[in-house]
Image (cartoon, helix red, strand yellow):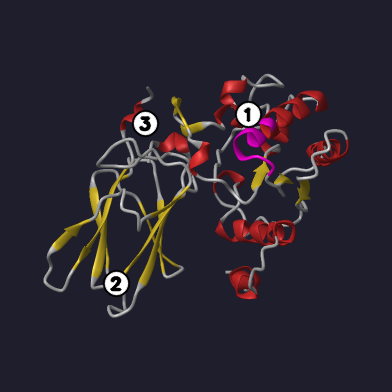
């Protein structure tokens, strides 16, 4: 096991403080705590996760609320209260983070998200920096070892542990969004179309096996163009016409969607503002397919450029 994995992320528990300052401990398995993503719940006292983008939420009222967390040296977390980002923090040791809302007599929504990669330690929307559909970033081969690509990690509960298989029956998504190809084609040697399609077919087969005939959106992100754009678009047509899978859709994002001043962060990854632009572009086609009657105020942050 790599040294980084010794520093386990353990979300302890959310607990509240009453006006009498009596501490009430709440188990991380409490039904009122909402998890989004792949969480290892095998331990009675803790939950673990390592994929980026995992989110944990709850609703609370009172003077304050605390979170006990051990995030390791490399992980960063976003803390949102009532939809507003209030802090970005690290917890290299077992730490209690205490939040004091401004309005004590109001019910508040708390959301905690992991913003760093799985390689930073165990601490899941699945995301992974450097991993591709068939070829990982910087690989000297045109096709990487399948077990080290995203399709090879699809069934894992923890990205860093191949032994734990995710229980796909525990939750079924309304749709699946695949944004792969940027790493495959960002450096040479590029995989050829046959190898790329073969990897995509295998991934779609895995999705169909565990989630059934849900809509699948094959996205080409704004950080890559040709030949990835054409390969993915042609692949979706192949699925619809030859495989008669009408629930596979193409979603190509324009390569001028993001600017280099505000929309990019570390190592040319999209920043928070860049991610909002990407989400806005994808919202409309996804909403059309799944009949999502979203409200215009859900786009305010993007439209205002926050």
Q: Report the front residue among 160 and 227.
A: 160
Which quadrant holds the C terminus? bottom right
Q: Report the front residue among 169 and 190.
A: 169
Whether residue 305 is visible: no
**Pointer 2 residue:** 61
Please tell me in which quadrant of the rendered image residue 62 appears.
bottom left
Whether residue 61 is visible: yes
Numbered tag placed on residue 4 in the rendering: 3
**Pointer 1 residue:** 136
Which quadrant holds the N terminus? top left
Tag nearer the camera, 2 or 1: 2
Task: Kindly report the distance in space between the C-alpha atoms of the residues bearing marks 2 and 1.
Answer: 46 Å
Location of residue 37 with respect to 22 vertically, above or below = above
Q: Report the front residue among 82 and 166.
A: 166
> Is residue 216 found left or right of 145 in the rendered image?
right
- Sooner in the amino-acid sequence: mark 3 or mark 1: 3
Task: Kindly report the distance in space between the C-alpha atoms of the residues bearing marks 2 and 3.
Answer: 36 Å
């Amino acid at each position: 096991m790599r040294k980084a994995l010794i520093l386990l992320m353990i979300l302890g528990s959310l607990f509240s403080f009453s006006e009498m300052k009596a501490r009430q401990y709440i188990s991380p398995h409490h039904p009122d705590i909402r998890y989004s993503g792949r969480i290892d719940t095998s331990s009675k006292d803790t939950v673990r996760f390592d994929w980026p983008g995992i989110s944990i939420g709850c609703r609370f009222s009172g003077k304050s609320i605390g979170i006990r967390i051990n995030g390791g040296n490399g992980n960063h977390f976003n803390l949102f209260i009532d939809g507003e980002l209030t802090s970005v923090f690290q917890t290299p040791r077992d730490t209690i983070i205490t939040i004091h809302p401004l309005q004590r007599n109001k019910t508040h929504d708390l959301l905690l998200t992991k913003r760093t990669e799985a390689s930073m330690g165990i601490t899941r929307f699945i995301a992974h920096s450097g991993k591709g559909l068939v070829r990982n970033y910087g690989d000297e081969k045109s096709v990487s070892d399948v077990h080290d690509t995203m399709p090879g990690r699809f069934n894992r509960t923890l990205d860093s542990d191949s032994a734990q298989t995710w229980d796909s029956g525990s939750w079924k998504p309304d749709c699946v969004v695949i944004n792969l190809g940027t790493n495959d084609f960002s450096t040479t040697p590029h995989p050829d179309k046959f190898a790329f399609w073969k990897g995509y077919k295998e991934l779609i087969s895995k999705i169909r096996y565990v989630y059934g005939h849900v809509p699948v959106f094959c996205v080409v992100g704004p950080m890559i163009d040709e030949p990835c754009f054409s390969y993915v678009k042609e692949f979706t047509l192949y699925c619809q016409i030859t495989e008669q899978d009408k629930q596979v859709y193409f979603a190509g994002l324009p390569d001028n969607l993001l600017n280099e001043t505000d929309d990019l962060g570390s190592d040319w990854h999209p920043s928070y503002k860049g991610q909002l632009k990407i989400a806005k572009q994808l919202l409309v086609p996804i909403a059309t397919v799944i009949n999502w009657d979203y409200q215009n105020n859900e786009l305010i942050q993007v439209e205002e450029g926050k």
